[in-house]
Each structure stands twice: as C-alpha cells, then as structure tokens.
Image (cartoon, grey):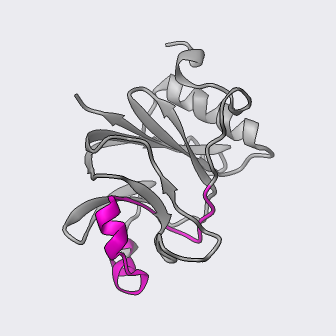
Amino acid sequence: MAMEAVFKPRSSRVPNPWLESSAFLVLASKRVTDLWDPDADCDALDRVAYTCDVVTAHGEECLVLNNEPLTTTWIKCHHGIAFVRWVAADNEQEVLTHAARTIENNAWEHTFHHRVGADPVLFDAYFGPKSDHPYECIRLPIAPGDYEVSFTREAPLSPSEVIMLRQLF
C-alpha cells in the first residue's frame, strides 16, 4: 500500500492535538472517564509492562499506553487510527514520517484484540480526564466495537512508537 493512502502530512490537513502525559495514557469510554478517580484507579496500571496493554476499570476494558511520559497524537489509517508517540526526534515531521513508514512496513511486535467503548477518550491516568492540569484529554472519532491493536517501537530511541487500532468488521 502506498504511503499516501495511509498518511497525509499534517501540513495538508487540520492538525490533531498532541497530548502531553505524566506517565500512563488511558483510552476509555466516556462512561469510564466519568467515573475515573486517579487515586483509586491507577493501582491497576502498575502491571502494564509492554508498550500497551488492557486493564479493566469500572467494568469495562481500557487500553493503557505504557508508563512513559511521551507526547502523543493520533492519525487516521487502515480502517482505524494509530497513536503516534514522540520518542526521540528533533521535530514533529520526523516523528510523523517515521510513524507512516512503520505503518506501511506493517512490522508489529505484538497484536491483540480490544473492545473500544462508546465515545472513547484518551487521557492522562494520574490527572484524570476532568483535570484542570495542562495534561488534557483527546476525544477520538472512532466507533465503538472490536479492534485489532498492534504496536511496535523499532529501537529504544526510535523517532516514534506506534500503536494502531484497526476496526474488525
């Protein structure tokens, strides 16, 4: 698949926000975000050892991006979205170009299935989605349902880490 079909440079479209994080980022339904209590809910995140994993919070699956304070955005691709995390790059274009190449090469370290709940939100776990802290949340334009989650980081200091959610039909 040609890169143009997967990724458009940010300069040619409305930019998606970059989300700063203190550590873990959580993708959860609006219902879970309404109930999220950082003091009570963050204990379950300590077992997340990979780039991402699934935990249960308030009776629903939540996707958790690992315990690294990496600036994160998302791009549309392959019947879903990809989270792009800024690891070690000099500028945004380097991060996004590396992410596009990673998606095109389709060389994933891990793949698993995850059910995304209604009105999904990506937020910093330790501050919560309703915090006044500068770590804001991102509401994602993806449909609830079953997704294949794939992720990779080519090397410890790659320009980006990519976590792709591809909707299963």
Q: Whole-percent x and y of residue 116? A: 29, 49
- Residue 47 appearing in the image: no
Using the rendered view, name the quadrant where residue 54 is placed. bottom left
Q: Residue furthest right?
A: 90
Q: Residue at x 74, y 42 (%)?
A: 92
Q: Whole-percent x and y of residue 90? A: 80, 46
Residue 126 as seen in the image, left or right of residue 37: right
Residue 39 as seen in the image, left or right of residue 87: left
**Bounds of the magenta segment:** 19-45
Q: Whole-percent x and y of residue 114? A: 26, 48
Taking the magenta stretch, the answer to whether it contains residue 40 is: yes
Q: Quadrant of the C terminus?
A: top left
Q: In this picture, is 137 found above or below 34?
A: above
Q: Residue at x 58, y 48 (%)?
A: 73
Residue 20 as seen in the image, left or right of residue 38: right
Taking the magenta stretch, the answer to whether it contains residue 5 is: no
Q: Whole-percent x and y of residue 101? A: 60, 27
Q: Residue furthest bottom?
A: 39
Instruction: Say how many tags the image has.
Output: 0
Using the rendered view, name the quadrant where residue 96 is placed. top right
Q: In this picture, is 144 found above or below 55?
A: above
- Residue 156 appearing in the image: yes
Residue 15 as seen in the image, left or right of residue 110: right
Q: Residue at x 46, y 58 (%)?
A: 122
Q: Residue at x 59, y 29 (%)?
A: 100
Q: In this picture, is 48 found above or below 80?
A: below
Q: Residue furthest left?
A: 59
Compare residues 47 and 94 and report the one nearer the observer.
94
